[in-house]
Amino acid sequence: MRLIALGLLLSAAAIAAAQTDHDNIDKGRPLSFEDAEPIATGGMAYEFGLNVNFLRRGRVGFGIPFELIWGGARNTQFEIGAAGAFGNRANSGRTGLDFSGFEVGVLHSFNRELPGTPAMALKFEAELENEGVYKTHYRVTGIATKTINQYDRLHLNAGVEFAPSAGAGENKTRFAAVLGFTKPLGYPRQFDTTGLAEVSLRQAERRGDAPIAGLGIGIRRQISPRSVLDIGLQSELSGRNRVPLRLIFGYSTSL
Amino acid sequence: MRTATHKVMAAIWAGLAIGLALPAAAQQHEGHNQPLKINAPKGPQALQPLPTNLPGWMNSRGYNEYFYKRGAYNFDIYNVDEMARDFNAIAVGHSFAYEDLVTGKAAKLETDTFNRIDWVLKHPPKNMPGEKFLSPTFARKYGILEHVFDWTHVLHAQTIDVLASTDLTHEQKDKEIDALWKFYKGTVPYTISGLPLNMEMLDGQAYSGAFREKYPKVNGLFWGYHWLQGAVYDMLWTSRSLSDAKSQYELVGERYREVELYKTNRDFMPMFAETSPIFSRRFPEIANAFDNLHMLHDMVNDILASDWLSDKQKDEQIKRAIYMVVDAPHVGEKAGDFNPNDPLHDHRFMDGQPGMGMMKMSTPQLMYMPEMGWMSMSECHHCSMPMNNDPKRGSGATISAQGWTMEVRCALCARDMAAQTEGRAIIRANTEDPNRPLILISDEEGNYTTNIKEVVFIEVEGPHPSCSSWSRAFTNRAAFDAYLQANEDDEELKGAKPLTLAEWSAKSGKEPETYEKKQGPVPNPYKLGGGGK
C-alpha cells in the first residue's frame, strides 16, 4: 500500500501541466471546504500538500496528502487520493511513516449558479481500509456556492460520515459542516490571488465528546497558467484530540 | 518581344478569368452577384421574436464545461510573452465591460470602466484570468452565452498556441489546427457556425449600433481586441521561428496598444480576413467562426446598451443572437448557399476569400473595406491582376500597414504599396521555398530588416499581368540562378541581375497600367448620406 501510494505521488509529480485556477476551490487546498463547480469534463488535476500539525504539548506531526481529480463525465468529477503521515499524531501514539487508505470520491454538480439560486453539488466519498490501521468510512456532502458582494463567494459544505466499523463508544454517524468564504484579492488590478476563510464544526469520533470547532484562513495564488500554490492556517478550537494549529502548503496543477 | 509576351499573358489571364467565371455563374442563384437589400428598422417595433425551436442546450442550467484538447503546444502563446499578456488583458477588458453593463454601472462605462480597463491593458496580467470570475453577475444572468464565448475563446487560444509552438513543424501546425477545429465542433453543442454569415443582416437588428453610439471608447476597445485577435494569425502563420514571431509582434503589438485600441472612428468591426487573409483562406471555417463570434459580441453589446429593452427582452434577444450564429438554424447549409429572401441564410463569401462573408452592400466581387475603399479580394490591391497566393508558386505577398493587411501578386507590388503607405509596414512574401517565407519589417523611413539575410530579388519591370514572374524574392543567390535557368526561354528574364535587399528596396516601380480603382454603389455604405443608412 505504501509503495503504491508513493508511486502515485511520484508519477503525478512528474507529469505536472495544464490549467488549474486559483478561483476554483478544492477541499484541502488549503482549507477543508470546496466549491460546487466540478472540473471540466475531460480535465485532470493533481494536488499535493504538506501539512504541519502543531499538537498539544509541543508535539509536531506531518501530513502529505495528494489527490488526482478527473472530469470523467459531464458535470461530474472523480477523485482518488491518499495521505501519508509521519511524526506525532493527534489521535494515536504512532510516529512512523504510514499511509491512509485510498480515498475515492465522486462529485456531481446539479446546476451552476443562477440568479437567486446557488450552484449545487453532491459528493460521495469513501476512505478505504488500510492495513487495519484506518477503518473504512463513507461521507456524503452537499455543497452550495453563492456569490455575495459581487465578487465574494460563500461555500457551504454540509455532510454526514458513516463509520460502520466504529468501535464501542464511537459514533457510527458523524455530522460535519463547513462554511467557507472566498474573496479575490487585488481586484481590479491583480487577478491571480484568492483569499479564503472558513468556520467548521464536526461531531467527535467518541460518543459524548464535544464537537470539534475550527477556524481557517488561506490564500491560493496562480503561479503559472497551469498551476496554483496555496497556503493556509487552521486551528481546532475544541475537542479531545484537536490540532491547535495546522500549517498547510499545497500545489495544484492539471494535465 | 517582351510586349508580345505580356500581351499573350494578359490574354491568358483574361481567358482564365472568363472561363472560371462562366460555369460558376451558371450555377449561381439569381441575384447571387447583387447586393442583398436588407431592411434594418430600429426600435421596439422592429424587435424580432425568439425562435420557438431553440436547441435544448440553450436552456441548460449546468456548468457543462469541457476541457480543451490536450497537446504539448498548450500555452505556447507564452513563447511570445508580450503577446500572451496582451491577450490576458483582453479577457479582463471583455469581462469588466460586461459586468458593469449588467450591474447598473453603464453610465460610467466611458469613464470609470474605461479607465479601469485601460489600466489593465497598460499593465497586462501575467496569467489569463477566468472571465466568469471577473464578471460573475453577467455569468449568472447569461451563462449560456458565457459558454459560447468561452469555448470559442478556447479555440482562439489553442490555435494561437499551435502557431506559437516551437516544437511543431509548419506542416504539423497545419494539421493540428484542422484537428482543433474538429475538436471544437465535435466536443460540445454550443459552437459558433463556420459558415460565412451576412454581416449586414447580423448588424441590422432592431438594437444594432446602440453600443458603439453610446459608448464609443469602450466599443473602440472591443474592436481593438478583435483587431489583435485577427492580426496575429498571419503574423504567426508566416513565422518559422520564434524570432520571426517576436520581431513582427513588436510592430503588431505597438500598433495595437497605441492605435487600434483607441480608434473610435471605425465604420465596422475588424474582420478576420482583413487582418489575416492567408490564414483565412487556408482555414475559412475558423475565420468565419471568429467573425461570427465577434459579431455576437457586438450584438450582445448592443442589446445590453439598449435601455428600451426590458430584462426579459434582453434575455430573449441575447438567446436569439446566439441562435443566429450557431449551427442550429444552418443545418444542411453550406458555404456559398444563398437565399435572396432570407439573409440569415446568405452564405456567400468574397471571391477569392472563403473566410469572409458578405458585408454591407457588398457582392462577392466587391466590398467596402474601411480605410481602403471598395475593393475585390480576388485581385492584387496594387495592380488589380488576379491573385494566386499559393506559396508553392513562389510569388505573392501581403503587406500589413496602418492596421490593414492586403494581398499583392509580387514583391514589387508589395514594396511599392508599402512605400505609398505612411508608417511602418510588414511585408510577408513567398519565396521559392514554401517553408521559408520572407518577412520584411520597415522602419518609419522605409528601411527594411529581414529574416533571410541572403535574400535576393529579381525585378525586370514589365506589364503587370506577368509581374509574379518578373518580380520575386529568393532565399539565396543559388535559388535565383535556378529560377533563371528554369525560365531560360523567357525573354523578359534574360540578363536579369540579382538585387540585394538594399538595391531592391531603393527601387520604385511605375504605376501599374492594370490598376483599376473600384467603384461601389455609394462612396461609403457605413456613413450617413453615403447611401448605407
Image (cartoon, coloured by chain):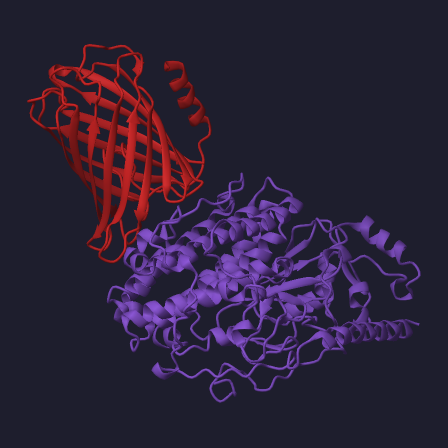
Q: Nearer the viewer, residue A186 or B33?
A: B33
Residue at horizontal 63 percent and vertical 64 percent from the top: B399
Residue at horizontal 61 percent and vertical 72 percent from the top: B348
Q: Nearer the viewer, residue B343 or B409?
A: B343
Tell me, what hue is chain A? Answer: red
Q: Nearer the viewer, residue B85 or A203?
A: A203
Is residue A61 at all visible to an observer of this figure?
A: yes
Q: Is residue A131 above or below residue B188?
A: above
> How far across and how far down the image is residue A170, in percent?
13, 19
Q: Nearer the viewer, residue B20 or B167?
A: B20
Residue at horizontal 61 percent and vertical 74 percent from the top: B338
Query: Which chain did the renderer colour purple?
Result: B
Position of B236 compared to B149: left or right? right
Quarter of the figure with residue B287: bottom right
> How far across and how far down the image is residue B345, in percent?
55, 72
> How far across and how far down the image is residue B309, in percent?
30, 75
Is residue B160 at all visible to an observer of this figure?
A: no
> How far across and how far down the image is residue B407, in percent?
66, 66
Quarter of the figure with residue B34: bottom right
Q: Which of the image's four quarters has the N terminus of chain B?
A: bottom right
Q: Is residue A196 above or below residue B279?
A: above
Position of B108 compared to B262: left or right? left
